[in-house]
Image (cartoon, rainbow, N blue to C red):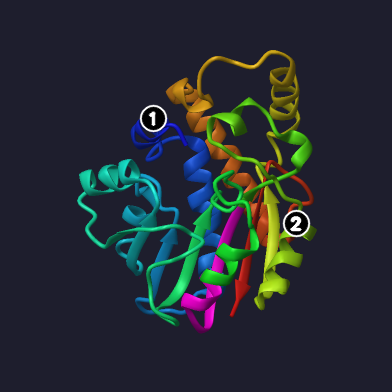
Amino acid sequence: MDLQEYEIMYRVEDGHWWYAGLRGVLRHYWGRFVQAGRPRMLDVGCGTGATLSAWADTADCTGVDFSAEALRFCRKRGLERLAAGSASDLPFADESFDAVVSFDVICHRSIPDKIKPLQEMYRILRPGGVLLLNLPAYQWLHSSHDIYVYTDKRFTRREAFAMLRQTGFHPLAASYWNTLLFPPILLTRLWRKLRPPTASDLDTEPSGALNAFFKGVMAVERALMRAAPLPFGLSVFLAARK
């Protein structure tokens, strides 16, 4: 990812509706599948650290990222339990964590072997530990946004489940999300295939009112998700157990 993108991420991810929605989906699955108490959690590809900060009262959190710039922003948040390393070669001992979270990491073009990071996450999880994984959905939606954040692969739920099973995980649940906003965002993404923008999607923040509206839409989605998995969306979120 471009270094400038980390600066933008650090500036917006605490309040931006998409990141808030992602953390809301994480809380939904965390509450269903992760043990009570204070589990040991690893964020693989922790970026600038918003999830680590949000989970500081819930778990003993450690972050790992290959980018020194990302870790620099984590330290600006006051985070200290950090490591530099690749998702394909995690610098931790076997069975070190109770839960692993990883958001939009194995889709990165710097990871040509998409199975290897999952094998590493499996290795460092204790038996019974839980993986919570978010991935961009549908390769045909690949657009200028993916180019800016160096995404080379988007996934269907079926593909992601197959990869988890291949690695030895037992899939627990999965749902697409960003479903209610799918039609307008789909049109935007398709248009950008013809007319790519010159700046990152995140560089233009929505107004306070619009941001609040989108957060409300995400809350409605999570309420629907409690009844049944959503059938399509811009992202797919999965839970699996070792």
Which quadrant holds residue 83? bottom left
Residue 155, compared with residue 62, is above or below; it is above
Q: Earlier in the sequence, mark 1 or mark 2?
A: 1
Task: Confirm or deny contact between disc 1 and disc 2 (CB under 8 A).
Answer: no
Mark 2 neighbour density, 10 Å: few (under 14) some (14–19) many (20 or more): many
- Viewer-proximal residue, 223 or 49? 49
The magenta-colored residue range is 121-134
Q: Is residue 82 left or right of residue 112?
A: left
The residue at 47%/79% (across/down) is 35
**Label 2, on which residue?**
157
User: What secondary structure predominates along the stretch shown in magenta?
Assistant: strand
Mark 1 neighbour density, 10 Å: few (under 14) some (14–19) many (20 or more): some
The residue at 45%/53% (across/down) is 45
Q: Can you give x and y, in whole percent of width and height, for residue 179 in the image?
A: 71, 42
Q: Is residue 188 left or right of residue 100?
A: right
| Element type at mark 1 | helix
Magenta span has 84? no
Magenta span has 131? yes
Number of marks in the rendered image: 2
The residue at 48%/32% (across/down) is 212
Q: Which mark is residue 231?
A: none
Q: Is residue 210 left or right of residue 60?
A: right
Q: Is residue 87 left or right of residue 196?
A: left
The residue at 51%/58% (across/down) is 102
**Label 1, on which residue?**
8
Image quarter (top left, top right, bottom left or bottom right) of the C terminus:
bottom right
Q: Can you give x and y, in whole percent of width and height, for residue 216 in the image?
A: 55, 38
| Element type at mark 2 | helix
* Alpha carbon distance from label 1 to label 2: 29 Å
